Image (cartoon, rainbow, N blue to C red):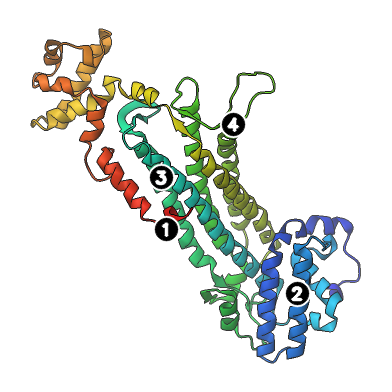
Amino acid sequence: MWSGRFTLEPHEMLTKFSESVSFDWRLYRHDIAASIAHAQMLGKQGIVPKEEVEQIQQGLESIRKRIDEGNFEFSEKLEDIHMNIEKALTDLIGEAGARLHSGRSRNDQIATDIRLFLREEIDAIISLVEGVQRELVNLSAEHVETIFPGYTHLQHAQPVVFAHHLLAYVEMLERDKQRLLDCKKRVNILPLGSAALAGTTLPLDREYVAHVLGFSDISRNSMDAVSDRDFILEFLSCASIMAMHISRFSEDVIFWFSQEVSFIEIGDQFCTGSSLMPQKKNPDILELARGRTGQVIGSLISLLVVMKGLPLCYNRDIQEDKIPLMTSIDVVKGVLAVLAPMISSITANKSKMLEAASDPALMATDLAEWLVKRNVPFRLAHHRVGKFVGYCRQHNIPLDKCSFEQLKSCIPEADESCLELWDPQKSVSSRDIFGGTAPNRVREQIQFWKTKDFMKET
């Protein structure tokens, strides 16, 4: 590879410390695909004889088959996936294999491989996101009129319908998906042909390679193409936001499943027990999801720290991009894959939800808005209702058990119609505004999602 410059063999500790094939072997299909496209272009441009291009292609396909079948031994001494494949190719077809690297550096080679890999993984993640969205929409459709306590600060706030809460996560995941699709536009740019940093004197046809590999564009600046990993950082940023959303959802479901709350039941097949306590049914999947998503956020920070001090152009530090990337992909895919069937196993305890949402204090805002409709300034209305709530708390009287006279003493504008405001069903139905929790508005949301392609999949 670079033995001509050196008189001593690499120290064994250098080999162990610097190898990357233990993790970048996962790029083998992408490396081989890029090499085949590069070889075809070299033949087209007359840089490598056509018959040797055919040998290279057949040899690479043979190596891919061996790796697919688990019949390929990777060597740390060859450092990375690129040199392992190139050495195997040269051993297989001889001198023709040594021509493959013409006009190419491992710098633009690895940048190409990672982009091919990441492009593919983004598509896989989006498919998994849609699977979770589909199950959330399906569960929501069952609970358009299931009254549920909405929270702020983990304190009872206002009644909503359970579907409205679930659909909030569908919206978050949709934005996550759109961020990934936008990120993919910048991933899908071909760096091959940039060589080490300055391009090459050989007459390469980069547009041809881009077309063969399905890239939408080619990089304009060779130094930028090989030395930056902002496309990975962008992906990790998108993945971190998604991980945060997944973690929040997991925390919500853990809370709902707690015995003190008991809003939902999760299927036995998605829970575990205790090695000591026979009665336990634990939501381990959700706890692991909440825990593992932290690795994604950590990976973003890790790679930012790697990149922040690097001068142009390529530096070996950049080799450290793969573990954060691959770890994050594995975590996100793993969590999404298990969330979808877990969601489908959820059953709601409607009576518990309704009981929690029936505390009349949750309708205090309804009373304030009742006053606003009668031309009382909102801040004054807020103050008077707050005074009424305080009076009820002080005298240990539920809001809906206060007499009309007691209500009137705090809120002079009140009339007997105020006494009808303590019904949570009427409360949610009254929030009949686009995006609101009124059942007819929630049905509109569900209908919107049901028109999406991902809802048509089985």
447 versus 160 height, above or below: below
CA separation in Å, label 1 and label 2: 38 Å
Circle 2: is it few (<14), some (14-19), or many (20+) Cα within 10 Å?
A: many
Find disc 2 in the rendering and name its residue. Answer: 60
Q: Measured from the top left, where is residue 380 in percent x and y?
A: 15, 26
Earlier-in-chain disc, 1 versus 3: 3
Q: How far apart are the alpha carbons under marks 1 and 3?
A: 13 Å
Nearer-N-terminus badge (2/3): 2
Whether residue 301 is visible, yes or no, is: no
What residue sits right under mark 1 in the picture? Answer: 453
Q: Residue furthest front?
A: 458
Q: Residue at x 77, y 86 (%)?
A: 52
* Chain-order first, disc 4 or disc 2: 2
Side of 95 relative to 259 (left or right): right
> Seen from this angle, which residue lies furthest top?
395
- Viewer-closest of 441 and 344: 344
Whole-percent x, y for residue 183 in the image: 49, 61
* Residue identifier under label 4: 271
Residue at x 43%, y 43% (from the top left corner): 136
CB atoms of marks 1 and 3 within 8 Å: no
Q: Secondary structure at mark 3?
A: helix
Res. 226 in view:
yes
Query: Which amino acid, mark 3?
Result: Val
Type of amino acid at the residue the image marks with label 1: Asp
How many angstroms separate mark 4 from mark 2 (CA)?
46 Å
Residue flagged by tag 4: what amino acid is it? Cys
